[in-house]
Image (cartoon, helix red, strand yellow):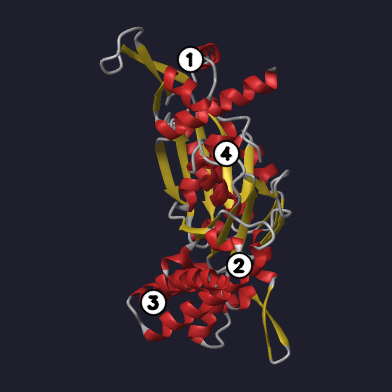
Amino acid sequence: MDDIRTTNRARILELLLQRDTVSRKELSQRLDLTNATISRITKELIAEGVCCEGKSYQSGNQLGRHQTDIFINPEGGFVIAICISAFSRIITITDISGKTHHEAKIPLQAVKSPESAIEFISNYVEELTKNGALNRKKILGAALAIAGSINIETGYLKQAPLLKWRNYPFGEQLTERLECPVRVENIADTLCLNYLERTGLEDDPYMNIFLIHVAIGMGASLAIDRRIVRKRGNEGLIGKTPALWHSDKLIRLDEISSGEAILQRLEGTRNLSKDTHSNITKRFQSAVDSCNRNSVLEKEIFLEAGKTLGASLMALTVTFSPDIIVLAGPAVAAEAFCEGITNTYQEISKGTDAETTKFLINKTSYIEATINLALREYLCSDIDR
């Protein structure tokens, strides 16, 4: 019975996060729960300070009992969201209603090592608490999204290639410094979890979603029946899959369709490993902009990279038939890249079950997805990992 109550509580809070304010009647209708169940749980949430109750009103021209809206109490607590990747280095403090109160860019100098990153993050939170801008007792927890390979259970960072970080107990160290629980995820799974939430509670509970994330490297996330399939926390495994044979040599997907591969084709034999990740991201963004301005070389290279990825996606997804393939990451801002992916996939899939698969472009930023992850983790406590 306690498990059922916890699940129902999480469902109510998820809907409130999506809709801001909802009446008890609408909660009952949308979640298919009895009025008594809704009344009991919302009463508990109000007593705990998690939710508030609005003024009583009569809906439309209907006679009968007045209704009151329920909404999440912005003073009920805060979550910390942190994103560290080549393209985004941000920390935010957000209340449980979803309003961000504090935001700071993590300087490049602070990500030279995991230790320096944790030092900046903890000092930032400490400064806010000292100034009276943040009540530490109201911090529910933190979520960190990072581009790399993660042990989901422990938050142990195995590697973050572009940052050149390896083998570090990020979750443990950050938990100790922030004095609150910390959830660590890779970027691809963070984006996919966000997308699963955005599709709505009324959607098909058996929906399969495949998210492909292309930045300087590339990664992927898979949800079957709306649950993330874990791959040892390593989003980058997709890049190691075979893409094609050339002159009796096997070419991996990330050697053709990643941001790094695209830059290497544009710039020749330049060794990107010696560049700072800030320098690489600026050049990649410039290449995307040139592609969208119809620069012949950039457009051709992005298109070919997209075609290879589109063909590979058909082979990779044929066994689980995704309802939706979500394209995410900085590379998908290049129109020719997305065109290459979708047109090739659709051409190959003609006459098969896969031709019904829809393509969507995820435009949610990394930090927005991380904020949502934190809210789901610490407010909607029954959400599955």
Residue placed at 46% from the left, 66% from the top? 332
What residue type is disc 3 on?
Cys
Indicate which disc residue 46 carries.
1
Residue under pointer 2: 313
Residue 25: where, in percent of width, then height?
A: 43, 18
Element class at badge 2: helix
Residue 72: where, in percent of width, then height?
A: 44, 24
Query: How many discs appear?
Result: 4
Q: Is residue 8 visible?
A: yes
Quadrant for the C terminus, please: top right
Residue under pointer 3: 291
Q: CA distance from mark 2 to mark 3?
A: 23 Å
Residue 246: where, in percent of width, then height?
A: 67, 88
Q: Nearer the viewer, residue 378 or 307?
A: 307
Q: Nearer the viewer, residue 160 or 220?
A: 220
- Left or right: residue 244 versus residue 371 is right
